[in-house]
Amino acid sequence: MAVKKVIHPSLTEALQQGWKATSHYLGFYVTLVLLIVLFNLIPSVIDGIFTNATWYSPVLRGVFIILIALVSLGMVRTTLTSVDRKEPTLSELFSSHLFGRYVLVSALYLAMVTGGLVLFIAPGIYWGIKYQFATYLVAEDKYTIAEAFEESSRMVEGHEWDLFAYWLVMAMLNLLGLLFFGIGIVITLPVTLVGYSYIYKQLRAGRPHPKHTK
């Protein structure tokens, strides 16, 4: 009988991998962070210019919400690509493959976490940790929506405190990045995101697709 390999994600190793990928593909990740910032700022700037166009603001914001969601999906894919030591590309960043499924999973996850936080706080944090990899599983083109949530729960089991600790590390590092005139976020954001993808990859190692185990 084969012995199941127990994975213990290392936060230090994750950040080291994040730094290596960010420094190696610095141009790409600077572009990625700038796109995220611009897509969040442009609607507010244009709102100030077209103050009388009441119909324009909702339409514009809708367009940029779609762009942000598309870049978020691409961000998942490209950070996973970096973990595999392959060069991420802009075409991969803007690929719409599985976009609809990704948006549905993201919306369900957000509603679940927000609802839990509004009710008693603790359930929101718990569900946030338990189902945090659902969007990643969908982005890899392997899982249905239900399978993604189920598999995320299985992956996270036994590693809840490690992952919560990484959440705190991500928050603190990116806060520090913002404090330095906002410039540091160009480095801290990709480092922590690639590190997060590295942890995901570590927890995914050796786990077959659910359909292959039936």
Image (spheres, rainbow, N blue to C red):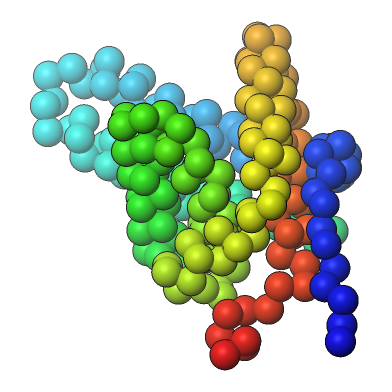
Q: Is residue 202 above or below residue 39?
A: below
Seen from the viewer's position, the closer of residues 142 and 9 is 9
Across and down, in percent, residue 201 comes to 74, 59
Q: How many marks?
A: 0
**Rendered residue at 82%/58% (across/down):** 7
Asked which quadrant contains residue 161, the reply is: top right
Taking depth in this image into account, of 202 and 27 the one nearest to the observer is 202
| In the image, residue 136 above or below residue 38 | below
Residue 132 percent across, percent down from the top left: 54, 49
Q: Would you place residue 145 above or below residue 94 in this image?
A: below
| Residue 202 % position (x, y) | 78, 58
Is 63 situated left or right of 20 in this image? left
Q: Does residue 7 appear in the picture of this structure?
A: yes
From the viewer's perspective, tell me whether residue 196 is left or right of residue 117: right
Which residue sits at x=27%, y=42%? 62
Horizontal side of residue 183 vs 66, given as left or right: right
- Which quadrant holds the C terminus? bottom right
Tell me the residue at 48%/71% (across/down): 147
Q: Position of residue 59 (x, y in %)?
A: 21, 40
Q: Name the residue rendered at 42%, 68% in the picture.
A: 145
Quarter containing the N terminus? bottom right
Taking depth in this image into account, of 73 and 121 the one nearest to the observer is 121
